[in-house]
Amino acid sequence: MPAFLFFFFICNVAGAQTAMINVQSRKLTSLNGKWNVIIDPTSAGDNMQVWLEKKPQKKTDFFEYSFQGGQVLNVPGDFNSQLRELTYYEGTVWYKRIFNYSPNNTKRIFLYFGAVNYLADVYLNGEKLGSHEGGFTPFQFEITNKLRSGRNNLIVRVNNLRKKNGLPGIGYDWMNFGGITRDVDIVETDRTYIEDYNLQLKKGSLDTILGFVELAGIGGDQNVAVKIPELKLIYKTKTNSKGVAMVQFSSAFKLWSPKNPKRYKVIIESETDAVTDTIGFRNIVVKGNKILLNGKPIFLKGVNIHEENPYKGARSFSKKDAVVLLNAAKALGCNMVRLAHYPHNENMVKEAEKMGLMVWSEIPVYQHIDFADPVVSDKMDRILRAMIGRDKNRCGIIIWCLSNETYPGTPNRNNALINLTQECRGLDSTRLITHVANTQRYQNNTFDVRDTLYRYCDLVSINEYLGWYVPWQGKPSDVKWNVVCPDKPVFISEFGGEALYGNKSGPIDEAAYRTEEYQAQIYRNQIQMFNSVPNLSGVCPWLLYDYRSLGRLHPVYQRGYNRKGLLSDKGKRKKAWYVMKAYYSGI
Ligand code: GCB
């Protein structure tokens, strides 16, 4: 049984199911648009059973809620940026949407959510379908036997309170955008449908695809075909008793790369279903101390990006939002983006791939994670599978990042993350795996990079803020390095500092005044230091745009924004932008 099938089983038991793959190529009815909402700061609606929408039966019956006459919010979209009163809101919002449907009795029907941050309890026509935890991955419910012909009433209780044992936990340096933040669709499939498939080059190969196609709702001996019309390729196979067909074939593919982001139209067919995808093929490995893309060394010219449209101060979700962010990365001269610190929406991943940007995708195992709580391991496991499950056919993704700046002293941290790494390798051996740490010591202008997690990684990823949180202790070009895995490639996954665009007001050599010149100087120094890093395979400034964050309170320089952007929240280029751009164009 492929691991994905196993997970489908677990999730069925828990409530929400793992989402089927490539939902965009199915018959969809969008439930995006205006939804009625009730803002419920104390979750009083739980006792009142809002999902039943009771109406008074006699004169003394009264209810303390109603969707009618209340507020309206756009879906998809975070709620914080839509209503001023919700700017920093963390709590419950009830969403309601009435829709009409004429179910076709020969089909199966699913209710699909691209993402809801953070907890979702979903009710259809007064009946609870189930719950889902985790703000950045898709989930679904089968509603074949629950949908009514005609009018249906969908209510979702969304709660974005931060949780000690959540992913992320209580503390994080970005905006806690709550709500139904990605698309909602009704999906219609055949009784037997293509639930999942994996079509990527086998580890180390430039011409052989190794993967599977998995059907839901059927046992063995079904015919399955994978077609790539441009290559005149038709590969035929059959499912086994579990509905899984193994796939292996070779062809002279034009390989995907940043210079030539070639992708093919691929049709996956069973006897009763067909889906179409656009898939590229490339090979990414670490050999010795180098990263090789399609057999050739590559230097990762990255930039960190949060899932926020700076011009709207809102969670981004659309293709348009993705293009805004990715065009800016391109303009900087990047060939790679780190999508920090959680799985971004599919538009982002697909557009990046289309534009020739390699992608680093990450799960929200961020800083203060309560590894000692046994439920945390289950949650990590689930979100890892959901991330890989959704995006495993995206050749643009070259790196799975499994944690960022967790604390080695936290009980069970190493065990939990080592297990997660092994699990990730089992699920997908074709991409690079990394953890980001900032546990290095820096003394006498020397870095001591010792985190145990690096032993399990393909890539040693280091966040360091020399010149910002940590003062330089000597000349940048003289920094010395002792790295625990001296043979592995090293990636500087974060560096930088804050500047308020246009600010020249303070002493230019003091970080606290956040001048553009100070930030630019950090970048000049860092670039000098890069020459000293052994096996340097790429760098990634923190970050592209200024972004909204919970803990950035300075009334003059920050006003609720982390100002480490190379671009302001209005897209203005700071001095450091030009320094970084010149560095990238020289490589
Ligand atoms: C970090 C974190 C990133 C923060 C950044 C900062 O190390 O990984 O999420 O926002 O520092 O600005 O301090």
Image (spheres, helix red, strand yellow):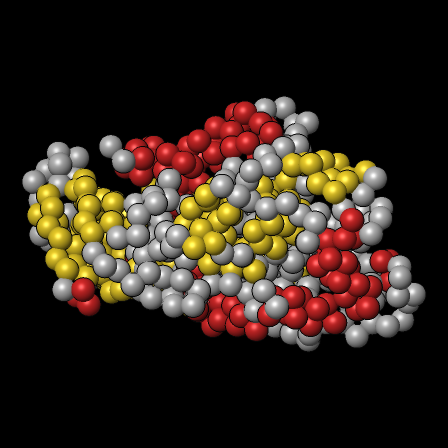
State the residue in front, 479 or 235.
Answer: 479
Horizontal side of 395 relative to 525 (left or right) equals: left
State the residue in front, 543 or 528.
Answer: 528
Examine the rendered structure and indicate whether residue 250 appears above or below residue 451. below
Q: Residue at x 73, y 57 (%)?
A: 528
Examine the rendered structure and indicate whether residue 450 appears above or below residue 401. above
Horizontal side of 147 relative to 162 (left or right) equals: left
Q: Residue at x 82, y 59 (%)?
A: 554
Q: Residue at x 72, y 72 (%)?
A: 574
Place of residue 205 in the rendered image (x, y in percent of width and height, measured from the top left): 30, 48
State the residue in front, 505 or 165.
Answer: 505
Q: Residue at x 43, y 55 (%)?
A: 296
Examine the rendered structure and indicate whether residue 264 appears above or below residue 390. below
Q: Is residue 198 visible?
A: yes
Place of residue 278 in the rendered image (x, y in percent of width and height, measured from the top left): 29, 63
Viewport quadrant of the N terminus: top left
Place of residue 269 in the rendered image (x, y in percent of width and height, measured from the top left): 15, 55
Q: Is residue 87 visible?
A: no
**Count of number-bearing discs:** 0
- Name which quarter of the figure residue 9 lies in: top left
- Name which quarter of the figure residue 542 lies in: bottom right
Viewport quadrant of the C terminus: bottom right
Horizontal side of 32 relative to 586 (left or right) equals: left
Place of residue 202 in the rendered image (x, y in percent of width and height, measured from the top left): 30, 45
